[in-house]
Amino acid sequence: MKETIYLDNNATTSVAPEAFEAMTPFLTDQYFNPSSMYEQAEGPAHAVEAARASIAAFLGGVAESEVVFTSCASESNNAAIFGAIRANSSRRHIITTAVEHPSVLEVCQEAAREGCEVTILGVDEHGQLDTTEFIQALRPDTLLVTIMHANNETGVIFPIEELSRLTKETDPAIVFHTDATQSLGKLDVDLTAGLEHVDMLSFSGHKLHAPKGVGVLYMRKGVPCRPFLCGGHQERGRRAGTENVSHIVALAKACELAAAAQSDEQQVRALRDRLQAALSARIPHIQVNGEGAPRLPNTLNVACHYIEGEGILYQLCEYGICASSGSACTSGSLDPSHVLKAMHVPFTAMHGSVRFSLSRYTTDAEVDSVIEVFPGIVSSLRRMSPYWDNANNRPRPDAP
Ligand code: PLP
């Protein structure tokens, strides 16, 4: 099998060896249900509470009781949005953005079907929000603002500190939720300094080197939110279901490692910037989506005009390179990404977008491999493109 060059860390990450080591005893010897009464269950019960304390510290020293374990970020987002709606029957207005993950956007659409009114804020060509438009969208009947911290496709960072502060200055009763799935472990996420106006925050283990199947919903004390999963006393009645002890332990370890690795951010950013500079220099007619906005240090979304992102990905696979495209293949048709559409990325580039997402485990040699093969892949696909003039190696004069 060819060697894997994994540059799709915004999709999922490898489990850190230390996290794997920490979790295994809870899959083997210490398999007891933490809610059981006998002595053997004390180990798993203590492990869950120790993990909760460690994650509370990682989030800036919040109260342990404010950390609720879930199964993934999608669940955390569903729980936050539906929970806030159910806790407030007198208000029906929600604000979100056009570039959210489907686990926010589709939940808001579902809420609209159930009688809520949803304002979906657009973004500019850099992927940024207009703060004035945001303030104007706040209404006396707004119950919830749900806006992501960093975008999974482009890495564009939203000014959550400012948006949450403006929300609370306008009306402290509005619940402010942020999906921090992509920012946690990559940016400083401090819910006591900076993000102190955020009421609820979602994230997931598998984006920061913990396993799939565990997430967190941070719920500030007193936030009005009904439980999403009912039928059990776990998580103080806020999320029923036996705790996923091994994964919770691994998540706490992964957060500890992320805190210790914060100095690696510069290294990841330098690698990403080197990749971006090399591709921009070697390939004509490409654009970096989100380049004009603050971005996550690990994410590079490049749009190659006149070709299909899927074609690029298939060819990258030949070299063992794993990346992802901006398009989602739904029911046999290739729809361009809703994020790039919202950014008004030109038609000829929207379909040719590829996202590279690095991690602290990405090496110089891996980035070199992409720099070596990517320009050739783009040229070969352009030779097959109806928009490309092969004789002159440039776009056809009538290309859109
Ligand atoms: N939110 C964002 C921004 C994401 O990028 C993702 C996954 O890609 C999710 C939510 C959903 O995460 P999970 O797979 O843990 O449900």
Image (cartoon, grey):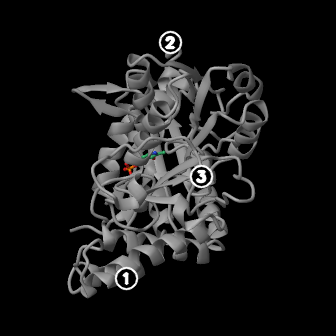
Query: Helix or strand or loop: what does disc 1 sit on?
Result: helix
Picture coordinates of residue 20 (x, y %)? 34, 78
In the picture, measured across the screen, residue 164 lies left or right of residue 342, that is right
Q: Amino acid at mark 2?
A: Asp
Rendered image: mark on residue 122:
none
**Label 3 to label 1, Cα distance in Å?**
28 Å
Picture coordinates of residue 129 (x, y %)? 68, 30
In the picture, measured across the screen, residue 262 lies left or right of residue 346, that is right
Residue 115 versus residue 329 in the image, above or below: above
Badge 2 or badge 1: first in the primary sequence: 1
Which residue is label 2 attached to?
398
Rendered image: mark on residue 22:
1
Q: Residues within 10 Å of mark 3 (few under 14, many from 20)?
A: some
Picture coordinates of residue 317 (x, y %)? 30, 53
**Label 2 to label 3, Cα distance in Å?**
56 Å
Badge 2 or badge 3: first in the primary sequence: 3
Nearer the viewer's eye, disc 2 or disc 1?
1
**Label 2 to label 1, Cα distance in Å?**
59 Å
Query: Helix or strand or loop: what does disc 3 sit on?
Result: loop
Picture coordinates of residue 7 (x, y %)? 43, 58
Q: Is residue 359 visible?
A: yes
251 or 101: nearer the eye? 251
Badge 3 or badge 1: first in the primary sequence: 1
212 or 383: nearer the eye? 212
Q: Is residue 393 visible?
A: no
326 or 103: nearer the eye? 103
Which residue is label 3 attached to?
220
